[in-house]
Amino acid sequence: MIGPVELRNRTIRSAAFEGMGRDNGPTEMLRDYHWSVAEGGVGMTTLAYAGICRSALSFTTQLWLRPEIVKPLREITDGIHDRGAKASIQIGHCGNMTHRSTAGGTPVGATTGFNLYSPTFCRGLRKDELKQLARDFGAAVNTARDAGFDCVEVHAGHGYLISQFLSPYTNHRRDEFGGSLENRMTFMKMCLEEVMKCAGSDMGVLVKTNMRDGFKGGLEIDDCLTVAKEIERCGVHGLVLSGGFVSKAPMYVMRGSMPIYSMTHYMKQWWLKYGVRMVGKYMIPSVPFKELYFLEDALRFRSELTLPLVYVGGVVSRDNAERVMDEGFDFVQMGRALLNEPDFVNRMMAEENHRCGCDHVNYCIARMYSREMACHKHCTDLPPAIRREIDKVKSSEK
């Protein structure tokens, strides 16, 4: 159970950004993918990432959760339910990881500054804007309900806006929203209060939170435990335990290396394409992949928290999933495995030793900022240079 919501099993499709939207709304491609995952046996599938307002958007391929897209979203959730699964949607605000043309104004964040990852200048949010953004989180829950979703997942990790307030790396405020960790949690608590009020008795609420930011100067595990305990006190129905910071330690989230040529091949801006090719390996350093790479940290959280916990990170086999559940985690989330095999859950149930075919070269991640996320094994039109890069990454991972 996730609050009032009962799943048919303990597996969840993680809120891995699909890049399958258009004009900040859903598409048939997004619909068909989530229907395939639901048909493939997952307990719940999560649409990602849905901005709570215009300034929350990083890309036009993301969803903007607003009344205008309720009807096509309802078609998606109805189909998910018809296939026996529950439907969740991740709600959040990207903070300073956007551009004026997408966000409809100067990007905003916890503090005025420059985000090299975008790259863009951003301005610090005013107190009155923080109150409105908290209300926007609540309104997004109501819109999600109208669209037929059973749960929402609040994004409070990975260097998005709530995480930007939590981390000392991005929060340099001198008011009651900055300084001590207690103060830096204030905006998060405001948002969760609105979310829980609007969720009422019929919507499940998960929160994705970091266990570490993944770099020196960010939140470490003891700080993140304090944050997690505060989230627990807010009454949410479960925590998704993750880590990493998109603008500083992106591969800490996913592990492995980023295939830079594949990433830049699909970029339309020539200056960005060649700039990233020159410095990308320094901006996006590799972090070695291993199965269940978050498990050691997650066990610390399991020992100190009582609410349901969702494990995510490096689940590629039935053995992995069973180990996670044997360690006391209530649910297991998977992203790349379900992109490689939408029927991964059914195959795990049918085959005792099943292991998915994902080889974690991260081509799917490399292209998602410019095109829809797709596994290279499903692509028949890859240029020779990309295939050579994929082969090179595979060799280096052995």
Image (cartoon, grey):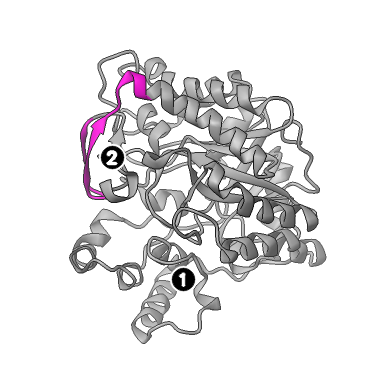
Q: Residue at x 46, y 71 (%)?
A: 398
Percent coordinates x, y for residue 122 in the rendering:
23, 37
Which residue type carries mark 2? Answer: Pro
Which residues fall within the magenta stretch?
112-129
Percent coordinates x, y for residue 83 in the rendering:
78, 58
Percent coordinates x, y for residue 18 in the rendering:
51, 59
Task: Report helix, strand or loop for mark 1.
Answer: loop
Above or below: residue 13 compared with residue 385: above
Rendering quarter of residue 236: top right
Above or below: residue 385 compared with residue 298: below
Above or below: residue 272 compared with residue 171: below
Q: Which residue is mark 2?
A: 107
Quadrant the N terminus occupies: top right
- Magenta region includes residue 373: no
Callout count: 2
Q: Seen from this angle, which residue lies furthest bottom? A: 384
Q: Which residue is mark 1?
A: 398
